[in-house]
Amino acid sequence: MGITKTDFMRGMQCPRMLWLDRHRPGLRVIPPETQARLDAGNDFSDRAMGMFGPYEEMTVYRPGTDVPDKAAMIERTRERMEAGAEVLCEAAFSNYNNYCAVDILRRTPAGYDMYEVKNAGEVRPQFVKDAAFQYYILLRCGVRVGKAFLVLHGETEEEPFRIEEVTREVRKLYSWINDHIWELNRVKKAPEEIRTEPGPQCTDPYPCWYWAYCHGEPARDEDGAEAEVRLFEDAAGQDALSTERMEGTDEG
């Protein structure tokens, strides 16, 4: 089954959130303003793909769906790296089924530099942890990573991107990632629901999409009326919704 980057970030915010993502995703309610931020983040990431000029995108979807085909992406990434591709976007890697897709991987004389794109104007702690998870997976896959960067909003439309190096911070988190990734694998596979009492983790660093369920309240729309819960299950099964569709999204 394994842990994705999004699994890790959500599971570290709240283990119950991760369990619900895997076992009861139909309980999610994504507020319109949150969906708008996710969409804006995806748009910003798409625009950043060309910031270093020509690039090759590794994204592959399962036939007839918008669910990434992780196995095909991993294979395409391997082939293009062996061919000496200079810039790869959504480069995919897996170690013991733990998976990430790097926004931008740029070849250097020393190996590769990695860039995580965030729809925000400043570095935030969760962004560094996000990048650290990818750094961990890349190293475990034998990739020679030189430096790690965050790509943030620039000051003007003429300079839309600002690059901040976070290599030192990311390297310091390697052991922390290793200490938690295997526990989150167990959380995700647990047969019984993980019980976590509501608290600060319900909104920090992001509002939880299971707020109504965990607080015993009906979901409400922006006008205060009881909202219809959005169902994500499809013919591909619950695991297809799940965090695979979410990879690359960002509320930041």
Image (cartoon, rainbow, N blue to C red):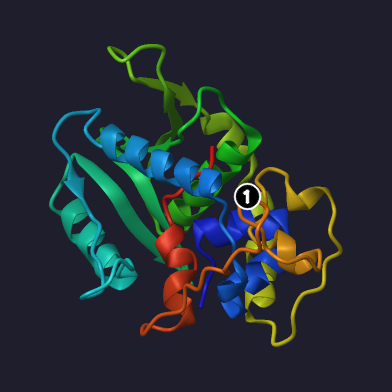
Residue projecting furthest to the bottom: 191
Q: Is residue 90 above or below residue 3?
A: above
Classify mark 1: residues with Cα within 10 Å, few (<14), some (14-19) or many (20+). few
Q: Position of residue 191 (x, y in %)?
A: 69, 87
Corner quadrant of residue 94: bottom left
Q: Is residue 41 visible?
A: yes
Amino acid at pointer 1: Asp
Between 20 and 39, which is closer to the camera in this rendering? 39
Near-viewer residue (199 or 89): 199
Q: In this picture, is 10 found above or below 172?
A: below
Q: Nearer the viewer, residue 140 or 76?
A: 76
Task: Name the residue tied to disc 1.
Answer: 223
Residue occupying image coordinates x 69% and y 74%: 187
Query: How many marks overall?
Result: 1
Horizontal and vertical percent position of residue 100: 43, 57
Q: Residue at x 60, y 43 (%)?
A: 129
Q: Is residue 206 left or right of residue 6?
A: right
Residue 189, percent across and down? 63, 81
Q: Using residue 65 as the reference point, say whether residue 182 is left or right of it.
A: right
In the rendered image of this protein, does residue 164 appear above or below residue 117?
above
Tell me where residue 24 appears, x and y as whole percent: 61, 78
Q: Is residue 215 left or right of residue 183?
A: right
Q: Tell me the SS state at disc 1.
A: loop
- The image quadrant where one finds the C terminus is top right
Q: At 32% across and 66% down in the image, what residue appears?
A: 68
Q: Is residue 15 visible?
A: no
Question: Quadrant of residue 126 in the image?
Answer: top right
